[in-house]
Image (cartoon, rainbow, N blue to C red):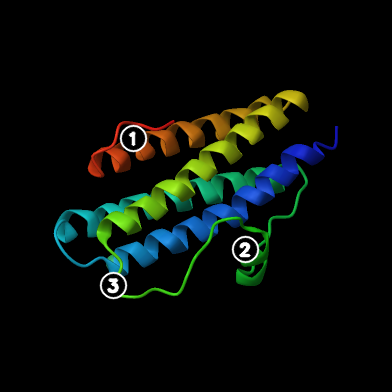
Amino acid sequence: MSREKTKAVLNQSVADLSKAAALVHQVHWYLRGPGFMKLHPKMDELMDSLNSHLDELSERLITIGGSPVSTLKEFDELSNIKLETATWDKTTEARLTEVVKAYKYLSDLFQDGVHATDEEDDDVTNGLFADAKGDIEKTIWMLESELGLAPGL
Ligand SMILES: [Fe+2]
């Protein structure tokens, strides 16, 4: 089976995880104010996790005969995550809210991946998407708790 839907969601994930990592890097650099000492290293942890899913999903795409996007231009064109030029006037709350929004998008995307892999009978990729979704959802819970919100999934 050619698994075209699975390959498409995998490549979408490569672009979106690359862009999400850039967004989290921006937050890591541009944080200013209360919570900096704990949130600055936390963003490093989130980036490591995004990059780990990125590598896993990209290599799975290659394993099943696909070709991952790999240039900054392709990431930017394909990704649905917005990334604006940073300014110093944004609150930490606003920055974390942007990260939550990106993570909720990733959670939905990985759900699309779960459906596509079910349909195309690819249990291995299905497991990767399910694991990535679980990790993303747990992070959404933590970020929303930091923001004083109940998990909004
Ligand atoms: Fe750093």
Numbered tag placed on residue 89 in the rendering? 3
Q: Residues within 10 Å of mark 2 (few under 14, many from 20)?
A: many
User: Which mark is first along the chain, 3 or 1?
Assistant: 3
Q: Position of residue 54 (x, y in %)?
A: 54, 50
Foreground tag (2 vs 1): 1
Q: Quadrant of residue 24?
A: bottom left
Query: With 82 as the anchor, is 136 left or right in this view?
Result: left
Answer above or below: position of 55 versus 26: above
- Evaluate whether residue 48 shows in this view: no
Answer above or below: position of 108 versus 120: below
Foreground tag (1 vs 3): 3
Q: Position of residue 87 (x, y in %)?
A: 35, 75
Cβ–Cβ below 8 Å for labels 1 and 3?
A: no
Numbered tag placed on residue 141 in the rendering? 1
Q: Is mark 2 within 8 Å of ligand 1?
A: no
Q: Which residue is mark 2?
A: 75
What's the amino acid at mark 2? Phe
Ligand 1 occupies quarter: bottom left
User: Which mark is first along the chain, 2 or 3?
Assistant: 2
Q: Position of residue 89 (x, y in %)?
A: 28, 72
Element at label 3 = loop
Real-space Cα separation, disc 2 to disc 1, in angstroms: 27 Å
Name the image quarter holding the C terminus. top left
User: For the point 60% across and 55% down, which residue is it?
Assistant: 80
What's the amino acid at mark 1? Trp
User: For the point 18% across and 60% down, which residue is it?
Assistant: 36
